[in-house]
Amino acid sequence: MVPEPYVRAQRPDQRVRAVSVLADSEALTDTLEKKGVWFRPAQKKKELFRKMTDDELRERLRDIAELVSGSRRELLERLHGKKADVITTWSKDRVETECQRLGLQVLEKKQDNVKNIRSALKLNRISKLSDEDLIYELAYRGLEAEDSREDSEKKLQAYLDGRLFD
């Protein structure tokens, strides 16, 4: 048996088009959308981010406590990479091994070790910034640069961790 919208056959040798197919009508999705019953699928985040300007990307990164300097490609990589947090899926042994590799103290709880790994990786990214990018990061957040680079890095790290407001 063939569903209603396609054909209605009364006998095997007859094929008559259904009335609903012959009628001049709009697509079912358009009708349902007008009634407020069906909505178009939301855009994928990657597509949404690609349509954003560089300034909008920087604002989004600032809101999620990420670095805002760099090229458009780097900004998009940070936005896409923020969603994928693979460290939490690691086993406790792997997390402890990563702590030892980074030269961090191994703690009892896996959560504490994961937190230390994240802050160490973020601090490592901050230390790799050029002097101009570090000053830009601080200025973008309304912070003043310190006398030494080390103090400026610590200030930016504190801001990104939310400790500057405590």
Image (cartoon, grey):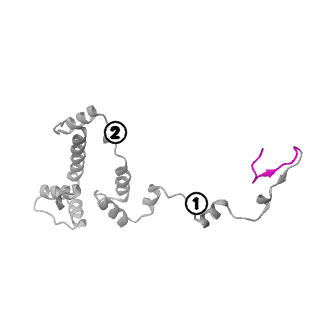
Is residue 66 covered in magenta? no
Q: Is residue 36 left or right of residue 139?
A: right
Q: Secondary structure at mark 2?
A: helix
Q: Is residue 130 left or right of residue 50?
A: left
Residue 61 locus on image (x, y percent): 32, 59
- The image's mark for residue 100 is none
Instruction: Name the residue nearer the viewer: 75 or 88.
Output: 88
Residue type, label 2: Thr
Q: How many other residues sit within 10 Å of disc 2, few (<14), some (14-19) or many (≥20)?
A: few
Q: Which residues are magenta?
A: 1-12
Asked which quadrant contains residue 85, the reply is top left
Residue type, label 1: Trp
Q: Secondary structure at mark 1?
A: loop
Residue depicted at 74% across the width and 49% down the height: 3
Residue depicted at 38% across the width and 52% down the height: 80
- The image's mark for residue 38 is 1
Is residue 4 covered in magenta? yes
Residue designated by label 2: 89
Q: Nearer the viewer, mark 1 or mark 2?
A: 1
Q: Quadrant of the N terminus?
A: top right
Q: How many other residues sit within 10 Å of disc 1, few (<14), some (14-19) or many (≥20)?
A: few
Give the Cα separation between the discs numbered 1 and 2: 36 Å
Residue depicted at 10% across the width and 62% down the height: 147
Q: Is residue 30 left or right of residue 57?
A: right
